[in-house]
Image: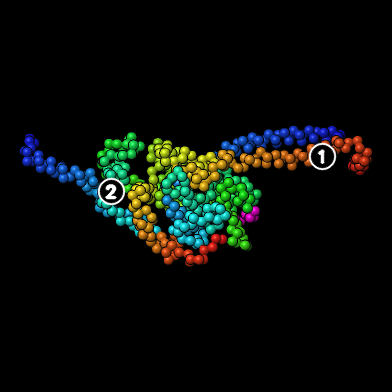
Amino acid sequence: MFVASGRLKRGVFLLIMLFLPLSCFAMDAPDTITIDALASFYEPVQFDHELHVGIAEDCSACHHHTTGTGTNNSHCARCHSNEEEQDLVSCQDCHQADSFTAQALSAKSEKNLYHVDATGLKGAYHQNCIGCHQDMDGPSGCTDCHARTEEGDKFFYSGQFAPPAGEGSSH
Amino acid sequence: MCKVSRRRFLAGGLAGGAAVMLAPAKKALAAGNLTGFPDGMGALVDLTRCVGCRSCEAACNREQNLPAPDQSFDDYSVFDQVKHGQKRRPSENAYTVVNRYESQSSDKPVYRKMQCNHCNEPACLTSCFVGAYTKTAEGAVTYNDKVCVGCRNCMVACPFNVPAYSYSDPINPMIKKCIFCYDSRVKHGMPPACVETCPTQALMFGKRDDLLKIARARIDREPGKYVDHIYGETEVGGTSWLYLSGVPFEDAGFDTSLQKEPIINNVKDFLGTVPMVLAIWPALFTGFHLLATKGKDHHEDSHADEEGEES
């Protein structure tokens, strides 16, 4: 029934070749992501996803094992070496924004839970970013990535809320 | 009749003394095994994750309504401050401070947050003779400034040099230290302000038992990254705050010479004998005195006089 002609075969091949590299580099991934789940002291971050796709060796550098590109972490590979791309791949799908609630903590006491040390969302972002940013001389100061809000300045006694110079005393 | 009852009194006193001697020894042994409340909370500080942003200091300042700092919390020149040959310490105006250390084992600087470690068996608590300190079931070591008399024994007793004194207040100075945000947060099941604000999750909040498991798992998973020790697991009987480090703990300003036993165990046996001494010695030495002076003339006379008056 499906005897494909030579031309059709070539067409399908070209089509696959066209989409193969794209699928490796997250074809349906967004170019920029606005990280604002935790914005109060800092402005939301415009995360240039496309830029990082270009820099990272493969998706698993950040996405662990969820993007179907395997995992290069030998520890994770014991269970997650051959996984399909999953439906939920964004950070906050797995990393809870509020990871120290009574509920979250009692879940951690579960005897059969393996991932007891899963980090919260804020910890996941920063731990994932800071190592590379320091090694590759990327921005690594707090306000290099996210500008502080007025509320943040108040919190840090910085900017317009800075203590008057010279008034500081040791006791 | 009178002499016989004296002898019996002495014998009874000695037997009682022996009983008291044995009792505190047993008690002290049992207390030495105390490892905190079963569901006590704690915090895990992972020095390999700390970037020295001082957000925890800012959060503490706001949560505890502390006065405005001398320098902004994003001013990192404070890491160079040395006073009296020491890096910064918790004070009446800052219940937690972060210090920077250089270590030969790491090419990056190491940052260490310092605050009350909330001991399982706190030396401050046991040194306080008015009972101003409380170790809550949640793990926090709190203090009651209403009963504090300002003796500052706790400042001397603390093996971590944490409690500070508000010398700036001449009218009503009092002890100031981290209380694990007990009143405003931990009591209600919320993490302390410093933990909640920490951007890298270098600070984690949870049941102390769970945190110990997590800390152990991190060491097991990356043995090259961590020193194989959880600071606070056994130090001075264990503390609610636990530390992991990638450099030797003494390089990050920790006192690694601390004993495993709670501080109180050093004096518990001795203190146990104090009530015995108070109860037994007066009776014992009165008895010795009476026996030694038995048959002496002037005493016989006085006794005879007393007996004569009584009869």
Please report the residue visible at 50 percent of the width from the left and 66 percent of the height from the top. Answer: A166
**In the image, residue A124 lies at what x, y percent?**
36, 47
Query: Which residue occupies 38% across, 38% down?
Result: A114
Which of the chains bears the disc numbered 2?
A: A
Q: Which residues are magenta?
A: B145-151
Give the alpha-carbon distance from disc 2 to disc 1, as whole Å.
90 Å
Q: Quadrant of the C terminus of chain B?
A: top right
Q: How is the image coloured?
A: rainbow
Residue B115 coordinates in the image, percent (x, y): 52, 50
Instruction: Tell me, for residue A126, which label it has, or none.
Output: none
Return the x and y of residue B82 as percentages of the image width and height: 53, 55
> In the image, is B3 to the left or to the right of B121?
right
Label number found at residue B286: 1
The chain under label 1 reads B
Q: Which residue is mark 2?
A: A55
Give the residue displayed 65% in from the left and 35% down from the top: B25
| Nearer to me, B81 or A17 | B81
Q: Residue at x 42, y 46 (%)?
A: B107
